[in-house]
Image (cartoon, rainbow, N blue to C red):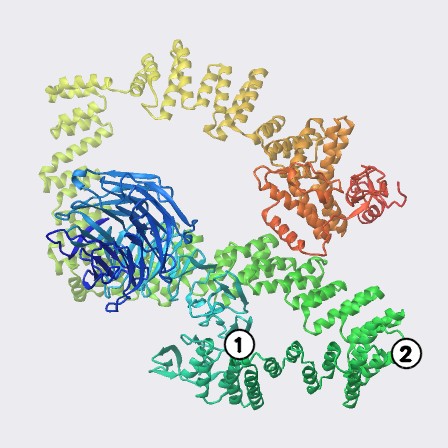
Amino acid sequence: MQLRHVKNLQPAQPNVARITAACWSPNNKRLAIADHYRFVHLFDENGEKRDRFSTKPIDSRGPKTYMVRGMVFSPDSAKLAIAQSDNVVFVYKLGLDWGEKKSICNKFVQNCAVTCVCWPHVRGNELLVFGVADGKVRIGTLTTNKCRNLYNTDSYVVSIAASQDGMGLISGHADGSIHRYYFEEAGQLAGSAKLCVNPCVPQGLSWGESVAAVGNDCKVHFYDPRTGAAQQTFAFEVNDDREFVTCAFNPSGHSLVVGAFDKLRLFNYNMKQNKWEEGQHKFFENLYSSTCMSWKHDGSRLVVASLCGAVDMYDACIRRYIYKGKFEFTYVSHSQVIVKRLSTGTRIVLKSQFGCEIVKVHVYRDLYLVSHSPTTLLVGDLGSCKVSEVPWNGSGQEQFVFDNPQVCMVFNVGELSLIEYGRNEILGSCRTEHMQSHLISVRVNDSPDLDDDKRQKIISYLVDRQTICILDLVTGIRIATIQHTSKIDWLELSKRATKLLFKDKQKQLYLYDIAQQTKATLLNYCTFVSWVPNSDVVVAQNRGDLCVWYFIDTPDCVAIVPIKGDVEDIERSDGKTEVIVDEGIHTVAYGLDESLIEFGTAMEDNDFEKACELLEQITITPETEAMWQNLSQLALQDRKLHIAERCFAALGDMSKARALNRIGELAQRAMGEDKVMSAEGYQHYSVRAQLEILNKNFKAAEGIYLERGQTKEAIELWEDLFRFDEAIAVCEAKQSGDAQKMRKKYYEWLMETRQQDKAAELREREGKWSDAINLYLQAGLPARAAHIVNTHQVDNLSQQQQEAIATALFRAQMYDKAGDFFEKLATLTSRQELNNRAIDAYKRGHCYRRAVELSRRAFPAYTVSLEEDWGDWLCAQKQVDAAINHYMEAHQHMKAIRAALNSRQWTKAVQILDQQEQNDPTVLKYYQTVASHYEENHQFTEAEKYYLKAQLPKDAVAMYTRNNMWEAAHKVAKVHMSDQQISDLYVNQARQLELQGKFKDAEQLYRKIQEPDLAIHMYKKAKKYDDMIRLVGQYRAGLLGKTYLTLAQHLEKEGNFKQAETYYVQVKVENLAGEEGVQEGWKAAVNMYRQAKLWEDAIRVAKTHGGTGASRNVVIAWALELGGEQGSKLLMKFGAVEQAIEYCNNRFLFDTAFDLAQKAMPSMIPQVHLKHALYLEDEGQFKEAEEEFIKANKPKEAIEMYIHTHMWPDAMRVASAYEQNAIPDVLIAEAKFAFERRDYEHAEQFFIEANEPKMLINLFKEAGMFSDAKRIAQTHAPHLLAQIELDEGQKHKDKSPAQAAKYFDESGDYARAVEEYFKVTTDHVPQDTAVEMWVRCFHLCLNHQRDNLPIAKKVLIEKLMSINKFEQAAQLLEEMEDYRAAVRVYVKGGSHTSMGKAHTNMMWKKALDLASNVSSDLENYVQEERLQSMKTAGEGTGIEQLYPEAGLDFYIENGNWDKAIVLARKRDEETRTEVAARWVESLVNEGRFEECLEIISKDGMSMDFRFYTSYASMAKGMMPYLKADGSQDLLSLKNGLYNLLEQMKKTGQPREDLQIMEKYLWVVHRYAMAHVMKQDGLTEYAAKLMVSVCRYAGIVPADKAFYDAGMAAKEAGWTNTGFVLLSRFLDISEQQEEDDPNINQLENADFVESDVPFDFEIPKEPWVAAEPAEQARQWVLSMSVDTKLAQTLATVKCQKCQAPNWEGSTRCHQCWDELPECVVTGFPAARRISCKNCSMPALKEDWNRFISKKRSCPWCYSQQSTIFNES
């Protein structure tokens, strides 16, 4: 924090003039200063003095000898408390505005001097705290003007300070003690406590982040405000600072200013390190002591007063900056920022109530503030100056919406949070993805003027686009949820949140009454809708009509105004409301009836008088009539009878108006009689009764009369209404009058008035059933007559009466009553034929439910027919969905399917279809219908599924292609169609798309079937050449150039030269390999334009693609075609004469060139002759060429021509005639020619003649002819002899070994040649040359130097082998007849795989051939080495071919089981099963148990005892993976385990091994046979097999065992069993979520009466996937609330001890009697028979039913027949 001096408010005096007190008002608008003269000076926020007044002594007539000891503003800034030393505290009322009258409103007189004062923020402005000299801290209550002790101490109160939140205070005393007090509102227990003891008197005391105390020891002490522990102490020199008198924390509590001598010391709190740090102190000369200081409550200013009366204002801030040029941000502390609008000067203080550091401040819409701290979010409204701070842990991606003036909406990761301005808590939150402001509406009605039931905070928002949620933000209760059929695109709550308007995508407008939970349609078409501001009036536009609902409680009453245009907005100001309509050119304002608008507001405020006055000013219309009606009802409820009377009079209901007038008079009389207030007159019983009668609440009126003992009036009430039955009831209840006489009179009156029905009721109550029945029949109420018979069991009816009742019921078409009558009568009389008649009546009345219930009891066989009739009737009534189950009950599956499809219950239809014969044509047709539905709804995966079930894969493919889903289409086609079918289908579809112009889609199909040529042809035919080129480049890149060329030629023929040019220029010669006579593309384009006489285009193309030279060639060609003067002009125009001549020369058009040169550029004539000469030279016309060379003045070129053609005489002739200097050159050239032909004599002659002996000598030296060189030198150049001899010696010295060897070899010096050959390496010569030299060396040794042969053998063989020349090395050894060494070299070459397969095979062949000719042991050696080499190289196939036995072992050793098993299958059965067993053993070791199934399915199981353990491990590992859905070949596994178990029994394996293997076998048997049973329709047996799996929990992982068992029971409809088993599964799953699953935590009560194990191990990881587990959990939860569910296992009695046992238990839990397991069902086999082959037991009924299906034993698979004799 930094302090900057702003201004001096009051100058210093020349003497002591102590400022005794200073304080800022909480609203930051006033500063009060109390001076030495007891005056209070008032300054405004800018430091300008605005007022002052003198303080008063305790005795107004006494002297002013007191001092002001303290001064503080009230929390509302309207009062000022002044503590004085004359034993009093005055409270002055100043008001909030300058100029208000000041007065003393409170006076607290004490017994001793008041020393200090503070005003905590508790209970508003009511409590004032001050300290007195006797050590007491007292509290004054302003409302009562009384004081009491807050707490007592024994020491003088020196200072007092309140906490930052105002809920606590501390006081400093003369003994150094500091006491703390908490008020109850602070969340602490009220009371005082001694906080700590300061080393000196705490003259200065303040409470911020810590408690700070200063005194005359020049030390600053910081204490923990909670514990009082000393935190830090800062000590300073007394000589420098003298003493500390005062200190003050800034409002955030994070900075402290201490007043010292001539300086201010600053201390700042480091929140990161949680400690206080000293800041830079401020020195002020002549400040002297600071007597008091005060912080402005926003922390922006500090006022310091001195001993000499000076008052200075300081600016206090950490930093300050301008935001967007509109706002000034002043950080007065880390947790407090002052935001000032520069244009108006208005301020708002952003302060973290939790002391958190404010990181950054944003301003939205120039009105709303948003700021973040590490743990909170602050939002503020600059208009209302309200700030809110809420805990926040956001993502940093929050979106803020400020459309509502009362709340800020914050969207964060799909969650909407609402923050009400001025409240430091989140108002509410909800989850929604729809963040648009028109899809969220919030209403906050919490005005103090409202009743509690109307203070609401409501939000409405979209859960999804079709669901509205209305939430009470105060309670968090969901008020309503509105499900809508269309997407909603606008919603808004009314002003008081009692109604909700919303509009959907269909433009329909709806009104939802929140209290009544009802929805009404306002408009079927609406383009604009809005609530009128600050009212509950609705304005909407329906096409050309403006609709206004002035009283929305009656939505049928709407005012309609025709308009032209569209409504834009609603404006309400200056007492009028207008609807702004845009009529195109201009806007028009349509005024609304302000009286009607205000009427709604008055009704909301219950101001019925005003509402009535407003309505009286308006003409009666249907809309206002409804308003009158509503006002009358509310007035009646509120006992405002005069208002209600006026309403009914306005409505024309004079009877009610007169009645109310009469009731009013009655109330006046009651008031006069009882002498009560007028309001109490309406409470008189007679008035209240008449009001109830008026409202037709007769029972309530009766009750009022009877409460007051007015029985007579009650009876007269009913008699006046002709309700004698009620009068009789009152008479009987109160025993007043002759009830019997009244009853008789009532009966006679009923008969006279022909009310037989009432008379029948009277007789029925009297128990006269027969009379009542006859009267009901006379009244035409046969149902009531039948009801008497059924209810009272009247069995003495005659046949005639029965028929009469039945006939009357049938005549009245009351068939259900007739049926009920016959049914009850049949029960009473035991006549079965009446049940028939009852069913017939029910059918005629379509009461099928009753008919079916009766049929099930009386005629079960007839039930099926009734169910079908029921379904038919429901379909006729368009209740197709309800008919489905009845058709199922009637076994009419096709009708059920048809009903499901017609009712669009697709899932139900599919469930039924899946249970039918899948190849039935009708079923296939329905599958197609289902698939078409899913396709229409774009559920393509489901559609595909059912197209395939309908055996229509082509339709599935067509569906995908229609929707451009090529990958999916191809996937289906590939699986379900042949390649040819796919191709034909795609081609046909592509051609259809082609006809429709959908070329891209057609291309996709062609590409899917790898027919790009068809696509290319399609694009070519459609003249879409760019797409054609694209495909050619992608699929036929080699033909791309030819395609470009073909297209260009085609377009050229059509005359489309521009397009042809585009393709020509793409042609490259290198892309047209094999095409003769084709030139580069751009040249073809040039030729095209040339042929078309479009020379300008030809020039353009040539220049663009061939450069300037090419364009000039075109110009030249054009000029040549024009010829003559035109051609010359053209060339001159393009400046290309020279190029034209050059062009002609290059084209051998020499005549034209001569012509051009002569006409336009004569200087080029020699050049033309030269070019012509060169051309003639190439053509072999040397004479003509010579002439042209001479004309071109180039005789030397003619000489070179003759030299080149070895025409020496002609060359000499021309040289002699035209170029004498060239004669030696001719002689030298002829000499070299002769020397090359070894014509040394002529060469020597010509060199000597040309005087070039040195050249001749050099040629001899180069040819190694040193003797001839010496001879010539002796004659013609003696000075070169020494050099020749030196060169001769040097020649051999500089030779490489290869050169030297070759030289000595050619010279016959074989010894030196061999020596040099030994030195030759591949560094000297190429490898092949080196090999040749080494072979030559070997032959020299063999033929001429045999002494060197052993060395040659060692050296040369190693050299050849080092470069992988094994064949040559071996051949040399063969020549030496060292065959064994040769074989070893061949073997080494064969093992060297880098030489290639063919080479190594050749090496092995040669080795084997040579070895076989030498010895058998050498041949075996070669075979062994070759086998080892192939193993090392991993050549399994080769080993298999050459060494079959070794091949199998090789594959096994290397884990190549696929090849090993293929090889084993070619052998005997034993080998195959052994290899398969070893493979299984390998997979088991790797934990790949499921893969073992395929091996066992194909190759069976070995019975070798070596593999028992492996198979047992495999079976154990397979337990978690077993499935009963047929996806696994479990029958093969079961058969293998069965045979293995039998073999183990034969070989005497340990008993425990047999037992565990048998358990594995039983488990596999259950899973395998369960699927078989399902396939054969034996679903009950399949369910029993799977349910009994739970007995093997532990063998099968426990969670899987109970899940599979429970799901099987659930699918079989055994709800109780399924519930118990799946509950067990869920208990196990919950234990699996624990770190250490404990079996003891499971509840076993449900399984006590079963043999299901309790002591199994719970797997740590679940074996049931999360999704099916969750589905099971949901099913169990849904069933747990079913009161009909038994939630127990089904039991049977033990045959031995009669104890109840679970029906699936094989062992009694009480007597332990055991029954064998049924091999068919897995349940106990009580009445059992046995298989004749394997003796496995089974229940007789189950066995016979299974055998009738399968004809074989389910255990051993032997052929069996049904058995009828139990074993």
Kindly indicate whether the residue at mark 2 contacts the one at mark 1 (C-beta within 8 angstroms). no
Front-most of residues 1233 and 374:
374
Quarter of the image containing the C terminus? top right
Identify the residue position indicated by label 1 in the image: 521
Amino acid carrying label 1: it is: Thr
Residue located at (21% from left, 24% from top): 1262
Neighbour tally class for label 1: few under 14, some 14-19, many 20 plus, Cα within 10 Å: some
Tell me if residue 668 comes above or below residue 1673 in the rendering: below
x, y percent for residue 350: 31, 56
Of 735 and 1174, the residue lying toward us: 735
* Extreme-front residue of the structure: 61
- Label 1 vs label 2, nearer the camera: 2
Q: Quadrant of residue 605?
A: bottom left
Mark 1 residue element: strand
Q: Report crowding for label 2: few under 14, some 14 to 19, many 20 or more residues within 10 A (C-alpha).
A: few
In terms of depth relative to the viewer, which is nearer, 1698 or 1523?
1698
Residue 1599 spot, x, y in % from top left: 65, 42
Q: Quadrant of residue 231?
A: top left
Can see residue 356?
A: no
- In the figure, is residue 552 to the left or right of 1613? left
Count the marks: 2
- Is any atom of residue 361 visible in this view? yes
Name the residue nearer the viewer: 897 or 1011. Answer: 897
Q: Give the label on residue 938, or none.
A: none
Q: Is residue 949 left or right of 1040 when viewed as pictured?
A: right
Q: Which residue is mark 2?
A: 799
Q: Where on the picture, by quarter, is residue 1090?
A: bottom left
Q: Earlier in the sequence, mark 1 or mark 2?
A: 1
Q: Position of residue 565 (x, y in %)?
A: 39, 82
Q: Distance from label 1 to label 2 (Cα)?
A: 56 Å
In the image, what residue type sits under mark 2?
Gln
Q: Secondary structure at mark 2?
A: helix
